[in-house]
Structures are given as structure tokens and as C-alpha cells.
Image (cartoon, rainbow, N blue to C red):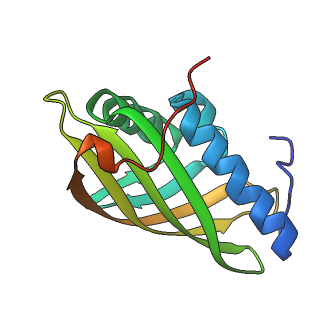
Amino acid sequence: MNPRPPLPPFTEETAIQKVQMAEDAWNSRDPERVSLAYTPDTEWRNRDVFLNGRTEVVEFLKKKWIREQDYRLKKTLWAFTGNRIAVRFEYEWHDAAGQWWRSHGNENWEFDADGYMAKRYASINDQPIREEERKLRWERI
């Protein structure tokens, strides 16, 4: 695998860049694209789901974005040091019944020397919202 800059140790500037790259990838809702930011043996905790490896990540994300329709995410740098970054995030989506949700929480990331995320631990809470309460919207072209 080729290095995936920016590489650790992170500065504030490179940590912000890494967070924006993650936000952009997740907003693509393309599981394959998202998975390429992680090591082949990546370790995840997403709520109460534990995943190991890119294959499990791709399958998880495929199911996620079937359930979480019109998903839109915003990530914000919380802290960084060495090869670790912590982010706060919120995303909005609706279920098949049309109920809108705002999901928010924290993620802790650990990167390998080549800039791939080896560990991702996410704590997430869901809040039902009315459509008019949405803050994150896609610009349709």
C-alpha cells in the first residue's frame, strides 16, 4: 500500500486535513472508497458492533446506508497527538418510514505510519428530529 498523506505525527493543520478527508469520503456513501482509508486489518467499534478488516467494514457500510437514507455528515477535530485524532460528529438521515434522525457522538482514531486508520472507536447517540429541524443538507445540482 502506498502512503496515505497526511502522515503522523499530526499537526493541527494535518489533523484538520485528515478529518476533512474522512468527512468527504463518508459523505460519498461509497463503502469501497471509505474502506480504502483503513488498514486491511482495521479494528472498529461502531456503537455495539465490532468489526475487523476492510471486508467487514464494506459490508457494514452497505447495510448502514440502505437503512440511513439521505445521510449527511459533519466531522470536527476535537484533539490530536502523535498518530491519534479525536473527532466530534453529527449526521442526519431518515429511515424508510420517513422519520428524520440526528446522530451525534465521538470517534477516536489511531493511524499507522503510512497514514491508514488502524483503529476507529465510535460512540453514537440518535435523536429523532422533524424535517424542519435539519441542519445538514445536500446541495442538489
Q: Which residue is painted at 86% across and 41% down in the image?
A: 2
Instruction: Say if 134 sits above or below 123 in the image.
Output: above
Q: Is residue 105 visible?
A: yes
Left/right placement of residue 45 relative to residue 116 reads left
Q: Which residue is painted at 23% across and 59% down in the image?
A: 127
Left/right placement of residue 88 relative to residue 115 reads left
| Quadrant of res 75 | bottom right
The one nearer the camera, 66 or 55, is 66
**Residue 120, image x and y in percent?**
51, 62
The one nearer the camera, 84 or 133, is 133
Left/right placement of residue 128 relative to residue 108 reads left
Left/right placement of residue 14 relative to residue 96 reads right
Instruction: Say if 105 sits above or below 25 in the image.
Output: below
**Residue 119, image x and y in percent?**
55, 63
The one nearer the camera, 75 or 108, is 75
Q: Is residue 38 visible?
A: no
**Residue 15, image x and y in percent?**
77, 67
The one nearer the camera, 51 or 21, is 21
- Placement of the C terminus among the 4 image quadrants: top right
Residue extending farthest left: 97
Residue extending farthest front: 132
Q: Which residue is painted at 32% across and 53% down in the image?
A: 102
- Please tell me how many numbered marks the rendered image carries: 0
Q: Which residue is painted at 65% across and 41% down in the image?
A: 24
